[in-house]
Image (tube, helix red, strand yellow):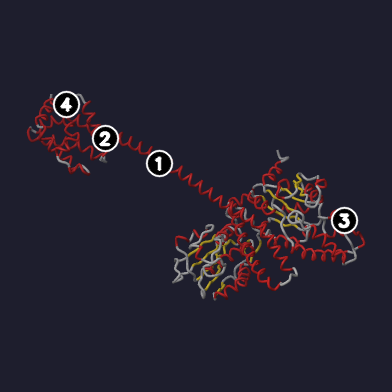
Amino acid sequence: MASKELAHWLKERKELIMVKWIRAVRKASPGTDALLSTRELGSRHLEALYDAFVSALETGDYSDLEAILEQLVRDRLKREYNLREVLVIALELKKTCWEELVKEFPSIQALEYLQAADELFNFMTIKMANTFTEESFAFIKKLNKSLEQKVRERTQELQRAKEELERIDKAKSDFIRIAAHELRTPLTLIQGYVGMLATEELPDKERIRPILQGLNKGIKRLESIIRDLIDVSYIDAEVLTLSLQPVSLPQIFQSLLVEFQPALQTRRLNLSISGLENLPLVEGDPQRLKQVFYNLLSNAIKYTPNGGSITVTGELLRGEQDFVHIIVKDTGIGIPPDKLERIFDKFYRVEDFRLHSTSKTDFKGAGPGLGLTIAKGIVEAHGGKIWAESPGYDEERCPGSSFHVLLPIKAQPRKAEYIQQIKLPVKAVIFDLDGVIVDTAPYHFQAWQKALAEFGLEMSEEQFRSTFGMRNQEILRTLFGTKLSSEQIEEIGRRKEAIYRELVYKHLTPMPGLLRLIQELKARRFRIAVATSTPKANASLILRALKLEHELAALVTEEDVEEGKPDPEIFLKAAEKCLASPENCIVIEDSPAGIKAAKAAGMKAIALTTTRPAEELGEADLVVENLAMLTPEILESLLEVGKQ
């Protein structure tokens, strides 16, 4: 009865209660709702809510009230109301009703009316809270789904961008590798022809001498660029080979000081070195470490104006692992702070390269932009770290820059891939030298003929062919038996090798396909070795002239073994130095004795018909005409034969 009486009273007092209620709601409302008039705010569901509330009191049917509440909550959510600002609608209605009831009725009767409506007020509060929660959850779910879709789309875009960058970087690395090796072979030919012209007795030789000197200068510059390109390709492929041994850093810098002295004098630069004399030896590759500091000093010279100074200092840092810390500091134009990391990227230059010369030592001379990339790759291959510091870039004030190199006393390559190469089965390709890397047979024959003629002896072409691949003493014993004493054999051998070195140096060219094959094998993580009956002096001369000395994991010559081919000792030693088991090694040979030695060592053998016909090389697993016919895929397939 109280509910119906209250409903009747609320109908009569509707206008008064609505005005007070809406004012209270507007005061608590955010944004534009606070600026709306009472009539405008009332039209936004509040009048309908009041009528539905009264009807529910009168009839006990909450369905209309429930629908109005849901609609009102959704409307407020769209306008970013929080839960308190939504619930205040019901709370303010209850408060306004109570204030008007106590004005007109005694307190006990007013309380009785309010208690009759209390259940309905509670329903409104709970319904509004539940609807708010459900709608918020649905909105969040929808928003989350939208965000997930956007995240998926952005992730896909990023993945596509990443793949495109990787493709571009791979294309760049492939270009570097291919370009370097395609340029290398014709450059070797050019170098050989220029060398021949320099030694020939030509008419008007004095006039062409400056031309030849200019050609040699250009050849050396191009050789340097090609070596840099090849080194970068090795660093990218993580196959940079280090020949570790104790290294004296003071000796490296003294050597570099002599090398850079002409440029320092021309540019009036002062280079001082201090603090290195007390440093311990470090474990490293001396040639590679010299390359690092050559690049850093060259960089300092190029970006320091005439009359400036360069200082090299060093210190020993002791800890769980001891390091040497080398600093190369200059008074040059400096480096922008945001470029301090990028300068180690391939081909990166701080300025437009078109504004500079291409000199290695002229002020702001531009190079290919690979020196710091190579330095970083070599230092990290040793397990060290390199970084640059500079206050900034200013060609007027010249704030300078400093390059820091941390090298462990005991080299510890940090790259997991490098360490894995040691742990996983290592694959190696062992090349013979004569007839495989270079075609030196004609020069060996000429050298034998000249050397033997000096002692009144002769060698036929057939005798040469039948003994080719043996060591000198074995050849002389086979051909002349006891006619020669040990002293004579040693003397003839020395003379022959001296003549051979003179001949081969003038005409040295790599076998077709060699340089390309070595590069591709290293990219597939094959280790490269040379095992030859040639004396070490000759082998080193040839490998140095072909710029192959840094490509090798091992070099084994006649001085390193007791027995020559066909004994397997020489190939087993090469495999041991490569840390490879015999079954994972392939030997490339051109002589029957070499093929026999390879098979006796338990290795696969590939024969080249460069010096012998195929029928004499039948024991080989594969016979080809030249190296250009071989690919890493062929060699990998050959290793798998018999393993299944």
Residue 140 position, x and y percent, is 34, 38
Q: Give the mark nearer the N terminus: 1 vs 4.
A: 4
Q: Residues within 10 Å of mark 3 (few under 14, many from 20)?
A: some
- Residue ID at (71%, 40%): 643
Q: Secondary structure at mark 4?
A: helix
Mark 3 vs mark 2: give the one in front.
Answer: 3
Residue 216 position, x and y percent, is 66, 67
Drawn side of residue 287 relative to residue 137, left or right: right
- 21 shown above or below 414: above
Are circles 4 and 2 on residues that touch, CB within 8 Å? no
Mark 3 vs mark 1: give the one in front.
Answer: 3
Q: Give the mark nearer the N terminus: 3 vs 2.
A: 2
Query: Is residue 277 shown to the viewer in this render?
Result: no
What is the three-letter code of the residue carrying label 2? Arg
Find residue 463 and name its label: 3
Q: Which residue is mark 1?
A: 150
Find residue 74 and name its label: 2
Query: Is residue 202 shown to the viewer in this render?
Result: yes
What is the three-letter code of the residue carrying label 4? Ser
Residue 251 position, x and y percent, is 63, 69
Find residue 55 and name its label: 4
Residue 409 position, x and y percent, is 60, 62
Q: Give the mark nearer the N terminus: 3 vs 4.
A: 4
Closer to the camera in the image, 296 or 305: 305
Q: Secondary structure at mark 2?
A: helix
